[in-house]
Image: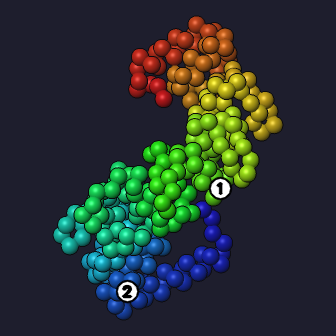
Amino acid sequence: MTFSTMAIRVLLAAYLCIILALTLNPKDALAWYNLVTLGVGGIVGGPQHSDKDCNMMALELDPKDALSWYNFGSQCGGGTVGGKQYSAKACYMKALELDPKLTYAWSNLGAMGGGTVGGLQYSSKVCYSRALESDPKSTYAWFNLGVTGGGTVGGLQYSSKACYMKTLELDPKDAKTWFNLGTVGGGTVGGVQYSDKDCYMKALELDPKFPNAWLNLGATGGGIVAGLRYSTKACSKKVLELNPKFAMAWLNLGATGGGTVGGVQYSAKDCYRKARELELDPGRAL
């Protein structure tokens, strides 16, 4: 990320103001929290304080600050507060005990398999649903709710396909979501119907280094990406240029008679042998 000279000056001014505030009052929990949000830590009272140090100080001073708990989990991976060790998951649960409408805490808890909040156990699926109850425009939550098979938001049931379509309505430049929409047969985005092939092509327009999208495009007979037509064989070769350990792509290339990968010509038999070697040794395969 690059910053303009003006932005750097503003950040530096903010940093100096926070350091001054903490020099005058080292028990200012909000100032410690603000130092964490800058992501640089700082020197207060002599010693250098890391982001984690600052976050721990904020929580020691104000253990009921939901955002500080969230940041402690998301930015620092957890740590020790009040003599007790907290994992990232425990931090998200603490944050949600204090503020059950904290969207990102629900999403992150979902990403860690769910957890217990207010004495109730929440699965990943339910965590993403709760995140969307708080913020129905969270693309991260819609996408992940789709990955878990869909769920209920605002009293309405959404399938995986519906979740991916909601994600793309909010962010049509998300290659991974286009790919996932393709895997469920395609769907309607912005009033336009997209087949599975169309979805894979959209994903590749956005990310031409997406091996799985090339593989699936090949499985649909190939298609057009960036104005160029790719056959099934060409799609398999693109996959292998990106990841030569993709067993399924070797198998598919063999099914089309073989081809050239990395400047080397492989017969159908060569391709099948490569696929077999990778499948027999899972550590070498994708």
Q: Residues within 10 Å of mark 2 (few under 14, many from 20)?
A: many
Left or right, residue 151 beside residue 252: left
What amino acid type is highlighted by mark number 1? Glu
Answer yes or no: is residue 45 visible: yes
Q: Along the horizontal axis of the image, is 194 left or right of 134?
A: right
Tell me the SS state at disc 2: helix
Q: Quadrant of residue 218?
A: top right
Q: Describe residue 216's horizontal placement relative to residue 66 as left or right.
A: right
Q: Residue at x 53, y 45 (%)?
A: 160
Q: Residue at x 45, y 45 (%)?
A: 148
- Pick the residue in front: 148 or 112: 148
Q: Residues within 10 Å of mark 1 (few under 14, many from 20)?
A: some
Q: Which residue is mark 2?
A: 22
Q: Nearer the viewer, residue 130 or 144?
A: 130
Residue tagged 1 = 169
Amino acid carrying mark 2 in the image: Leu
In the picture, measured across the screen, residue 286 lies left or right of residue 200, that is left
* Residue 174 position in % (x across, y down): 62, 50
**Could one spot residue 87 in this view of the protein?**
no
Give coordinates of residue 245: x percent, y percent.
52, 25
Taking 231 as reference, is 151 above or below it?
Answer: below
- Quarter of the image holding residue 231? top right
**Which residue is pictured at 40% across the width and 83% down the height?**
31
